[in-house]
Amino acid sequence: MTNDLTKRLMWSALLAGLGALTTIVANRLAAAIWTRVFDEDPPDFT
């Protein structure tokens, strides 16, 4: 792992993967809280 470009690409992939995972977890947590508080599905903005 002495190639600087490889390290940068691996870091970017790790950061993107964790960002996506965090977004999914946050979305599910927010939906669960919304459902519990308001006793209905969260709004759909599609």
Image: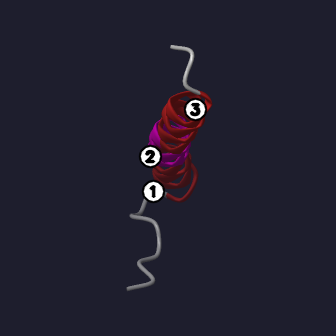
For the point 45% across and 83% down, the residue is 45
Q: Which residues are magenta?
A: 17-26
Q: CA distance from mark 1 to mark 3?
A: 41 Å
Q: CA distance from mark 2 to mark 1?
A: 21 Å
Count neighbours of disc 3 (C-alpha within 10 A) and say few if under 14, some if 14 to 19, many if 20 or more. Answer: few
Measured in 3D between alpha carbons, the distance from the residue under mark 3 to the one under mark 2, in whole angstroms, is 20 Å
Front-most of 7 and 39?
7
Establish if 11 lies above or below 35. above
Residue at 47 percent of width and 39 percent of height: 13
In the rendered image, the vertical position of residue 28 relative to residue 42, given as above or below: above
Q: How many marks?
A: 3
Looking at the rendered structure, the kind of residue marked 1 is Asp
Q: Secondary structure at mark 3?
A: helix
- Count neighbours of disc 1 (C-alpha within 10 A) and say few if under 14, some if 14 to 19, many if 20 or more: few
Rendered image: mark on residue 39? 1
Confirm whether the magenta stretch covers residue 23.
yes
Residue positioned most to the front: 3
Q: Which residue is mark 3?
A: 11
Q: Quadrant of the C terminus?
A: bottom left
| First reached walking from the N terminus: tag 1 or tag 3 | 3
Tell me the amino acid under the disc marked 3: Trp
Q: Are marks 2 and 1 in contact (CB under 8 Å)?
A: no
41 in relation to 19, above or below = below
Task: Please identify, in this view, whether the residue under mark 3 or under mark 2 is nearer the observer.
Answer: 3
Residue 31 rendering spot, x and y as whole percentages: 47, 52
Circle nearer the N terminus (3, 2): 3
Q: Is residue 1 magenta?
A: no
Q: Secondary structure at mark 1?
A: loop
Please give the name of the residue rendered at 58% of the width and 32% of the height, measured from the top-left corner. Answer: 11
**Among the two numbered marks 2 and 1 on one chain, the one whose residue lies closer to the N terminus:** 2
Q: Which residue is mark 2?
A: 24
Location of residue 36 in the rendering, given as x and y in whole percent from the top left corner? 50, 46
